[in-house]
């Protein structure tokens, strides 16, 4: 029996990651990717969730190489029947911060630079108190952290989880207004129409009209049989 | 299934007005298609008369709407970081799914070029939006089934200059034959639900607020019609014909009307 949680995240700090870089402007799209959410919620390489990965792929603070290992990290979640959908902004505001910095090394072994050139730019961040919402589908009850950290600044966010009740399963054509990862639904569902949000590493889709199996609860039809898939 | 897609774009460097013409946007679309499906790009490039897609001129997001008109000419460059949108409509049933890798694998780090300007595609809207009347999709069967059997008034907004081929020459006057035969030809070509040509005979223009505007093209200037025009279905007309005419009117969002629709001309939307 599948358990579905509605997971609400509320920002207590401003959230930043670069969805897009336009010259010196770094923009944060108000949508949380499901890959990132799996890491933030502590589901990857975890003893508690039985998603431990091979030693060479283990998720450590220090990584010898900066190469994402989504496939190695997320496949154990498929085996445990855990799936997290990307989160949409329920309500959000943005703030634009200008930053600048100059080189102020205290100890320079190389020859000193002749000019002190400051670097500057602007970051569009998601403001505190913004709320995001995602769905977590699981084959067994999950214990999730009360607080998580998100984005490049490791911004603090509170997590509220509510189990949805009276879940019915059926099949047919339906619309799911929340964001989805296309790779995770395209192989099990016929996707008819959608909007695309362009973001790395996999662009997300929303307002998806699709045909296939779904769970119906609280007036919402959530696609069933979703799992992490990787295009090769 | 016809799709009307809105591509939201941001230039990383200024786009010169010189590169904002229909010809350049047409070339950009074929480059986008060819990047995921070279044979399809070649095929669309070779289609001479009835192309299976239409394109709008590039639009700046926050510009105050001048009635129902869109912008087709620019006097100044578009500045970097400006939010712009661009409409692409696809008429052939399979085009949307064949281009799925394009909509889904758009790498934000990859930029597309309009002249010397780099563009980033930020999102693609393919479903109806409260703030964007140009995004939609519907199957041909749905368009037909959902069309009214009773509505006898059809009002069109000509949002970019529209012109029609009449024999050897062009005419900018949107007569019922010009407008509805243009829609009918495209409908019959792509829908698989053919309508007869004589259905237009019961239409009569009932209101018009139109004028001619010029569009610059490398070959010279084109005169086109912009504004609002309403046609009324008069006489004792069978409900099947009324439904067919309403279907064509709804289809105008996707098909556009008249000539040079793949170059930004003839963007037409039903108002009522």
Image: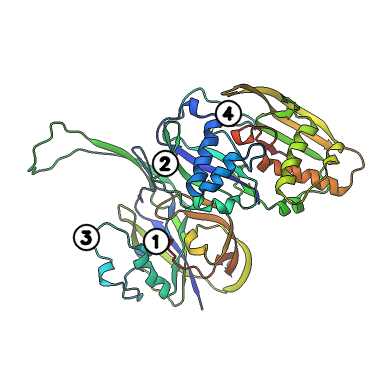
User: Residue visible at 59% across and 33% down?
Assistant: B263
Q: CA distance from mark 3 to mark 4?
A: 53 Å
Chain ID at mark 4: B
Looking at the image, residue A81 sits to the left or right of residue A60; the answer is right
- x and y, in percent, of residue B187 in the image: 73, 45
Looking at the image, residue B155 sits to the left or right of residue B18; the answer is right
Q: CA distance from mark 2 to mark 3?
A: 30 Å
- Decide: few, some or many residues near mark 4? Use Cα within 10 Å; few <14, some 14-19, many ≥20: many
Going from the N terminus, do you reach mark 3 or mark 1 first? 1
Chain ID at mark 1: A
**Dot 4 corresponds to which residue?**
B72
Chain ID at mark 3: A
Chain ID at mark 2: B
**Dot 1 corresponds to which residue?**
A35
Q: CA distance from mark 3 to mark 1?
A: 21 Å
User: Residue visible at 37% across and 59% down?
Assistant: A36
Q: Are marks 2 and 4 on the same chain?
A: yes
Q: Nearer the viewer, mark 1 or mark 2?
A: 2
Q: Are marks 1 and 2 on the same chain?
A: no
**Residue B61 visible to the viewer:** no
Q: CA distance from mark 4 to mark 1?
A: 41 Å
For the residues bearing labels 4 and 1, Cβ distance under 8 angstroms: no
The C terminus of chain B is located in which quarter?
top right
**Dot 3 corresponds to which residue?**
A64
**Dot 2 corresponds to which residue?**
B111
Residue B195, relative to residue A232: is it above or below? above
- Decide: few, some or many residues near mark 3? Use Cα within 10 Å; few <14, some 14-19, many ≥20: few
Q: CA distance from mark 2 to mark 4?
A: 23 Å
Q: Are marks 3 and 4 on the same chain?
A: no
- Decide: few, some or many residues near mark 2? Use Cα within 10 Å; few <14, some 14-19, many ≥20: some
């Amino acid at each position: 029996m599948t358990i579905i949680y509605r997971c609400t995240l509320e920002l207590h700090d401003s959230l930043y990651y670069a969805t897009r870089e336009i010259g010196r402007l770094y923009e944060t799209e108000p949508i949380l990717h499901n890959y990132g959410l799996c890491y933030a919620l502590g589901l990857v390489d975890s003893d508690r969730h039985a998603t431990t990965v091979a030693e060479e792929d283990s998720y450590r603070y220090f990584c010898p190489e900066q190469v994402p290992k989504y496939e190695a990290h997320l496949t154990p979640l498929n085996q445990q029947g855990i799936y997290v959908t990307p989160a949409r902004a329920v309500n959000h505001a943005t703030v634009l911060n200008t930053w600048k910095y100059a080189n102020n090394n205290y100890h320079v072994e190389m020859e000193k630079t002749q000019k002190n050139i400051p670097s500057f730019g602007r970051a569009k961040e998601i403001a505190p108190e913004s709320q995001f919402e995602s769905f977590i589908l699981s084959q067994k009850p999950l214990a999730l952290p009360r607080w998580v950290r998100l984005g490049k600044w490791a911004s603090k966010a509170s997590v509220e989880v509510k189990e949805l009740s009276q879940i019915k399963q059926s099949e047919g054509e339906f619309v799911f207004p929340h964001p989805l990862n296309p790779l995770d639904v395209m192989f099990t569902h016929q996707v008819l129409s959608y909007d695309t949000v362009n973001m790395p590493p996999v662009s997300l889709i929303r307002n998806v009209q699709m045909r296939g199996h779904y769970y119906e609860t609280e007036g919402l039809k959530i696609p069933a049989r979703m799992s992490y898939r990787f295009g090769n | 299934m016809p799709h009307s897609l809105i591509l939201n774009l941001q230039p990383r460097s200024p786009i010169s007005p010189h590169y904002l013409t229909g010809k350049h946007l047409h070339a950009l679309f074929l480059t986008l298609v060819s990047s995921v499906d070279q044979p399809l790009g070649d095929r669309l490039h070779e289609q001479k008369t009835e192309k299976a897609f239409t394109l709008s001129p590039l639009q700046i997001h926050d510009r105050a709407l001048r009635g129902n008109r869109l912008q087709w000419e620019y006097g100044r460059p578009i500045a970097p970081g400006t939010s712009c949108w661009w409409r692409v409509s696809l008429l052939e049933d399979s085009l949307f799914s064949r281009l799925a890798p394009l909509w889904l694998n758009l790498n934000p780090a990859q930029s597309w070029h309009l002249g010397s300007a780099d563009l980033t595609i930020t999102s693609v809207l393919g479903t109806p939006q409260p703030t964007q009347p140009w995004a939609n999709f519907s199957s041909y069967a749905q368009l037909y089934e959902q069309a009214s059997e009773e509505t006898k008034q059809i009002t069109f907004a000509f949002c970019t200059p529209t012109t029609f081929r009449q024999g050897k020459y062009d005419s900018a006057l949107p007569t019922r034959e010009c407008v509805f035969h243009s829609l009918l030809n495209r409908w019959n070509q792509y829908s698989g639900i053919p309508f007869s040509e004589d259905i237009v005979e019961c239409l009569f223009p009932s209101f018009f607020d139109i004028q001619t505007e010029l569009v610059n093209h490398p070959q010279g200037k084109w005169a086109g019609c912009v504004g609002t025009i309403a046609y009324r279905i008069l006489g004792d007309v069978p409900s099947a014909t009324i439904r067919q005419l309403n279907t064509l009117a709804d289809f105008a969002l996707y098909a556009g009307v008249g000539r040079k629709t793949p170059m930004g001309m003839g963007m037409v939307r039903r108002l009522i």
